[in-house]
Image: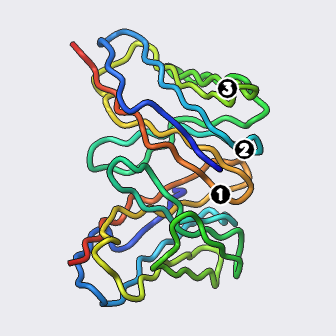
């Protein structure tokens, strides 16, 4: 069935790079998304990638897509305390959009 | 400004009292969808709509209804709310570029 898996927690030191990984099952996905959610807040779209792309970079964010392995990653360079949040991976087919359970990113000083 | 607007943002109600959460988008998007977010479960799709008068069930449709009479609006209806529908609800719309916009969320408590 349709599924998206992410690790639950990630802890990184301030200034280091964070890499959040995601695997999905649906090979017919068209778009893949990364969202950020801070405590008590809504979902902020960080970036998204069309399924025929391998990589997308936007300032400190780099998304890598390995279609063969159905693996998506989000790299955050120079991680700051303001990056502390839950990060959701999601993919969409023509009709459905499936989310992972989220990865909680915490930043150590 | 492009946005998805949900109302109410917060609601406390009692079991069995019908309620509607409204969702409106100003981007002329064809696709709209409702999700609920529960701790540890991420977001689960309740219903979606590919266009006006076209709606379909998501993964957790039980206890919910929707309608799509016009493109901009996609209300979520709880005919007889129960405590297990206490959750954070998000509406979203998506355009042809694939960008998926979310509303700010509606926190519903059913006593």
Q: What numbered label is drawn on residue A55?
A: none
Q: In which quarter of the image is the C terminus of chain B?
A: bottom left
Residue occupying image coordinates x 55% and y 75%: B74
Q: What numbered label is drawn on residue A65?
A: 3
Can you give x and y, in whole percent of width and height, for residue A99 in the image? 53, 47
Can you give x and y, in whole percent of width and height, for residue B15 in the image? 26, 85
Q: Is residue B55 shown left or right of residue A11?
A: right
| Residue behind mark 2 | A29
CB atoms at circles 3 and 1 under 8 Å apart?
no
Kindly indicate the quadrant of the structure image that contains residue A7: top left
Q: Earlier in the sequence, mark 1 or mark 2?
A: 2
Residue occupying image coordinates x 43% and y 36%: A87
Q: Which of marks 2 and 3 is nearer the N terminus?
A: 2
Can you give x and y, in whole percent of width and height, for residue A95 in the image? 70, 60
Q: Is residue B30 shown left or right of residue B101?
A: right
Chain of the residue under label 3: A
Cα distance in 3D space between marks 1 and 2: 9 Å
**Is B104 or A86 nearer to us in this picture?**
A86
Q: What numbered label is drawn on residue A96?
A: 1
CB atoms at circles 1 and 2 under 8 Å apart?
no
Look at the numbered disc 1 and give the secondary structure of its residue.
loop
Q: Is residue A59 shown left or right of residue A79?
A: right
Cα distance in 3D space between marks 2 and 3: 12 Å
Kindly indicate the quadrant of the structure image that contains residue A39: top left
């Amino acid at each position: 069935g349709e599924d998206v898996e992410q690790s639950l927690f990630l802890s990184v030191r301030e200034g280091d790079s964070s890499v959040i990984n995601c695997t999905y099952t649906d090979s017919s996905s068209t778009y893949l998304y990364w969202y950020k959610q801070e405590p008590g807040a809504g979902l902020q779209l960080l970036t998204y990638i069309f399924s025929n792309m391998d990589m997308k970079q936007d300032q400190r964010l780099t998304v890598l897509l390995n279609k063969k392995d159905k693996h998506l990653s989000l790299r955050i360079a120079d991680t700051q305390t303001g990056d502390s949040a839950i990060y959701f991976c999601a993919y969409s087919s023509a009709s459905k959009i499936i989310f992972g359970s989220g990865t909680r990113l915490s930043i150590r000083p | 400004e492009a946005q998805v607007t949900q109302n109410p943002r917060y609601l406390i109600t009692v079991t069995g009292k019908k309620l509607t959460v409204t969702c409106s988008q100003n981007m002329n998007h064809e696709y709209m969808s409702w999700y609920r977010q529960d701790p540890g479960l991420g977001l689960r799709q309740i219903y979606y709509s590919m266009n006006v008068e076209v709606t379909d069930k998501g993964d957790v449709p039980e206890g919910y209804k929707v309608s799509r009479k016009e493109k901009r609006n996609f209300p979520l209806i709880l005919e007889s709310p129960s405590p297990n529908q206490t959750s954070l609800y998000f509406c979203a719309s998506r355009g042809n570029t694939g960008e998926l916009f979310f509303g700010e969320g509606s926190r519903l408590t059913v006593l």
